């Protein structure tokens, strides 16, 4: 989930919104490259969304399904789920490559990407737009709300039963298990609620535009529909930032893995230098 969010910041924000716009005649503006960038912006956003859903389901299994937890909550299962979700999303977003055409041709070189009115009004494109929007916003909303509600109900029931077993005499004593559950709930709902709040505007705008067809701004940047759409786009990109920050602030294992990642290039260099030095010493001997 953190990796997908990082890819959103790199591809969607840095490559697409900064480099492509600030350098309109660069290599990034060639039509094939431009189409690939647009395809990757769709893929990275979908990965971020569905890895959040997968995280919510994983926490639901870990906290509520003790029998299923033994078989499901393993590194092998996590790798399988991650790979499967990634492959399905890469396949789902392939139609994005066929929505755009060259914006202009200069000396037989295609530049830019644009979507024509004929393409956007095609029944297949309209149907795919509905499918794409529902899979990206409203279906994840529904699943996250469902898993969270089941998780909180299960935790409250288990906590109530645990307090009853411990008795009234230990009410004022610190319960490590209860504290662990409380932190799990806070982490789960912080990530889920942040995702829903930041994506909600884009989800509402998606339904409004599809149902009323008011997304024809005709260059009017003062149009309320344009402002709302751009605000929703900004907020959904902003949603890629909190998860990594939350993990870095709250999860000790996550911080340790980050440190290993930052140290790994230097560790590799030191290992190569050490091996080269040992090889030189053997040759001299």
Image: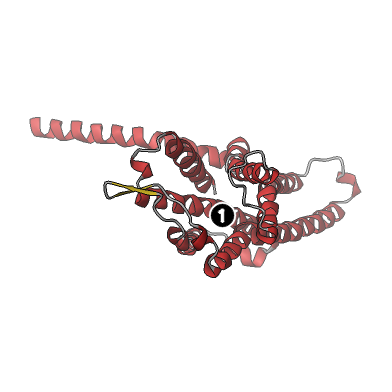
- How many other residues sit within 10 Å of disc 1, few (<14), some (14-19) or many (≥20)? many
Q: Is residue 60 visible?
A: no
Residue at screen point 79% across, 58% down:
153
Q: Is residue 168 visible?
A: yes
Q: Which residue is mark 1?
A: 51
Using the image as rendered, state which of residue 110 and residue 89 is in the foreground: 110
How many numbered callouts?
A: 1
Return the x and y of residue 282 as percentages of the image width and height: 12, 34
Image quadrant for the C terminus?
Answer: top left
* SS category of the residue bearing label 1: helix
Horizontal side of residue 43 vs 214, given as left or right: left
Using the image as rendered, state which of residue 217 and residue 46 is in the foreground: 217
Return the x and y of residue 96 as percentages of the image width and height: 47, 59
Return the x and y of residue 175 as percentages of the image width and height: 77, 44
Is 247 rendered above or below residue 35?
above
Residue at screen point 61% across, 35% down:
249
Return the x and y of residue 240 as percentages of the image width and height: 57, 43
Horizontal side of residue 72 vs 271, given as left or right: right
């Amino acid at each position: 989930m953190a990796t997908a969010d990082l890819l959103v910041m790199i591809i969607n924000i840095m490559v697409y919104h900064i480099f492509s716009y600030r350098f309109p005649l660069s290599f990034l503006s060639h039509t094939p490259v431009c189409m690939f960038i647009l395809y990757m912006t769709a893929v990275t956003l979908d990965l971020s969304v569905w890895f959040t859903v997968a995280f919510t389901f994983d926490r639901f299994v870990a906290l509520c399904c003790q029998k299923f937890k033994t078989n499901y909550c393993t590194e092998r299962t996590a790798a399988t789920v991650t790979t499967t979700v990634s492959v399905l999303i890469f396949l789902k977003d392939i139609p994005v490559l066929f929505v755009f055409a060259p914006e202009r041709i200069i000396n037989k070189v295609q530049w830019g990407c644009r979507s024509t009115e004929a393409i956007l009004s095609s029944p297949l494109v309209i149907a795919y737009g509905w499918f794409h929007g529902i899979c990206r916003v409203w279906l994840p909303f529904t699943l996250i709300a469902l898993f969270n509600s089941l998780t909180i109900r299960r935790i409250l029931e288990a906590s109530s039963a645990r307090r009853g077993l411990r008795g009234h005499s230990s009410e004022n004593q610190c319960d490590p298990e209860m504290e662990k559950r409380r932190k799990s709930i806070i982490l789960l709902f912080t990530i889920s609620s942040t995702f829903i709040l930041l994506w909600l505007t884009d989800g509402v705008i998606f339904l409004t535009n599809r149902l009323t067809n008011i997304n024809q701004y005709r260059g009017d940047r003062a149009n309320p529909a344009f402002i709302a759409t751009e605000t929703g786009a900004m907020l959904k990109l902003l949603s890629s930032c909190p998860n990594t920050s939350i993990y870095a602030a709250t999860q000790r294992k996550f911080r340790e893995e980050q440190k290993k990642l930052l140290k790994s290039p230097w560790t590799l260099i030191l290992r190569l230098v050490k091996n080269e030095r040992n090889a030189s010493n053997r040759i001299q001997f």
